[in-house]
Image (cartoon, grey):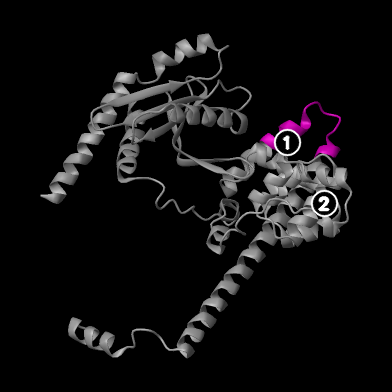
Amino acid sequence: MNTRIKTEVAAALPAVPPDHEKRFFADISGILREGRRKAYAAVNFAMVESYWKIGRRIVEQEQGGKDRANYGEYLLTSLSRHLSDIFGKGFSYSNLKYFRQFYLAFPDEKIRHTLCGLLSWSHIRLIMRIDNEKARHYYLDESREQDWSVRVLERNIKTRYFERLLSTQKPRAERAKPEESSGRPGLDDLIKDPYVLEFLKLPENMEGKESRLESVVIGHLRDFLLELGKGFSFVGRQFRISTETAHFYIDLVFYNYLLKCFVIIDLKTQKLSHQDIGQMDMYVRMFDDLKRGEDDNPSIGIILCAEKDETIAKYSVLSESQQIFASKYKTILPTEEELAAELARNTRYLREMREERDA
């Protein structure tokens, strides 16, 4: 259809759809939303049920080998490697511990069926960490009946809402309501749930999470570090680490087999701030807690800051007792000058590309 015909057709259409068309559009949108909601609910049910069954099977296997020292730890480590090789992300040692804890917290089949059908894995991970059994069941019921978001649930647990109710002992109708958010997350947020994507082995949508500068520099930096040949092996880009309710993405992750440690790299396009350093320290602590093996040295964090007139490289090793290691890594990792030079080179390369494009 040429431009003239398109213009004539557009001119013939009413500027505002009549009421019957508005209802028609609303009906179709409603059908699609309901279909997507049902699809998400079905996937969530299958995923949570699978995690519960995995937890039960782990407990059964551990009980069979209980006469062996440290059998449970060995079992989860081996299982994590096996599942990760076959299914990819989502089956780390810490996640398998969550599956086991899930079953131990809710061994009853009827409760499991309720959990699978009505609550997300993020809700369950929060609730199952509560030691008090009555409190666990209270938060289960309230999350389901009041349709609490994960953030509302987390806030109410942290503010000990259940314990405060016990202290008042008021009838349910007279109790003050807990804090509530603006509502449940939108359907798009549910569909993009990283746990669901991992369960289905689908890639996460990283669109909008990195700038053009980051994309170019990180891609070149990865090759630069591998070319140095000082023991680097590439682990991942935009590598996700998660708490119970939040997800963080690290630009680049390597493992250095000479140092026996992870090396995580974060690129900042603005001036380096104390907040950036604090964030990297948090990343290092989280990585050591969730990913570091028993025989690994402390993880190393590197912040690269690209500004118009300044390039900075900042290293972070948080284990003060590892002084020998801290001295050793300086001879194996690229120097701050090498990193700064590579970062500046890539920044110039990007600027030249922009100038050619705009010429």
Which image quadrant: the N terminus?
bottom left
Q: Nearer the viewer, residue 255 or 358?
A: 358
The answer to whether residue 230 is seen in the rendering is: no
SS state under label 1: helix
Q: Residues within 10 Å of mark 1 (few under 14, many from 20)?
A: some
- Seen at 56% across and 63% down, the residue is 187
Q: Find out whether residue 69 is within the magenta segment.
A: yes
Q: Which residue is mark 2?
A: 138
Left-right relation of 299 to 151: left
Position in image of residue 350 (x %, y %): 22, 40
Q: Nearer the viewer, residue 152 or 318?
A: 152
Which is more N-terminal, label 1 or label 2? Answer: 1
Q: Residues within 10 Å of mark 2 (few under 14, many from 20)?
A: some
Q: Which residue is mark 1?
A: 75
Part of the protein shown in magenta? 62-77
Q: State the predominant SS element of the stretch in magenta.
A: helix
What's the amino acid at mark 1? Leu
Cα separation, mark 2 vs mark 1, equals 33 Å
